[in-house]
Image (tube, helix red, strand yellow):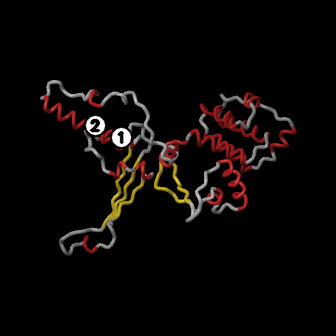
Amino acid sequence: MRREPAGDVGRAKEMDETVSEFFRRTILKIPMTEMMTILKTWNFLSENQLQTINFRQRKDSLVQDLVLLCEENRASLKDAALLDIIYTQFHRHQKVWDVFQMSKGPGEDIDLFDMEQFKSSFKKILKRALKNALTIASKHHQIVKMDLRSRYLDSLKAIVFKQYNQTFETHNSTTPLQERSLGLDINMDSRIIHENKIEKERVQRVTQEIFGDYPQPRLEFAQYKLETKFKSDLNGGILAEREEPLRCLVKFSSPHLLEALKSLAPAGIADAPLSPLLTCIPNKGMNYFKIRDK
């Protein structure tokens, strides 16, 4: 058991109980296998301080020791928030992230975004007033939540900034399509082989034109809400008098939805090209769609 010098104990009491509890809850969330890595990334506790900790003890005792060290260093709420951010970065795939789009007002110039200037401006404005702080600091007219969500921040970034549209060389990209193996039965009629070969080439060409020859951004789902009024040539009936539209929800999900969609036609599961409602996801920057009557 580590004994604290009297001076350190006196300083420890200066840390607010709320901050101490924030530290305790944050550290409790960190898996033991990642504890040292995250604490070193945080870089708030010195190497010597970390060496005084027994990382093989029970977790509640470990948490208590770490909180005491934070108190010794007079940790602030800002330090606790940074530790929580680092933990979130390590486990960013466990959350579903929303995307917001910034837009300028009519007639305003589009200037280059300076991240350092933004940070400085954001901190000053945040201190004065929290309301509408991000819009003002980034010099934008408004911020609107986009219909785009995913657990993968890198993919969201790639879609929003159109960074996915790059041609990456693949292991067989230099091989002419007609020379690639089509996996056909050699005993089949030559005319059937020829027709299948032409169709497979068409499917490959259309798929590449739509999705490109590069890895797709990673999304787990696409959701479509349909609202339509009942239409019929027959007069009368319960549905004909209904004023509320008929509603239907369709959701496509996959660990890697866009790659799954890209493989449908080449696998013979769907016709090529796929519906624009499925292929437009990266270009439109959305995976939540509302389809209504025109």
The local secondary structure at tag 1 comes to helix
Query: What residue appears at the point 77 percent right and 42 percent down from the top-left corner?
Result: 71
Which of the labelled discs sits on residue 260, or is there none?
1
User: Is 252 displayed left or right of 187 in the figure?
Assistant: right
Residue 245 lies, in percent from the top left, at 33, 68
Q: Nearer the viewer, residue 101 or 80?
A: 101
Q: Position of residue 89 (x, y in %)?
A: 59, 41
Dot 2 falls on a residue whose secondary structure is: loop
Residue nearer the viewer, 45 or 141: 141
For the residues labelled 2 and 1, the Cα–Cα distance comes to 10 Å
Q: Which residue is located at x 53 percent, y 55 percent?
A: 100
Callout 2 amino acid: Ala
* Residue reaching furthest to the right: 7
x, y percentage for residue 52? 75, 29
**Quadrant in which the C terminus appears:** bottom left
Residue type marked 1: Ala
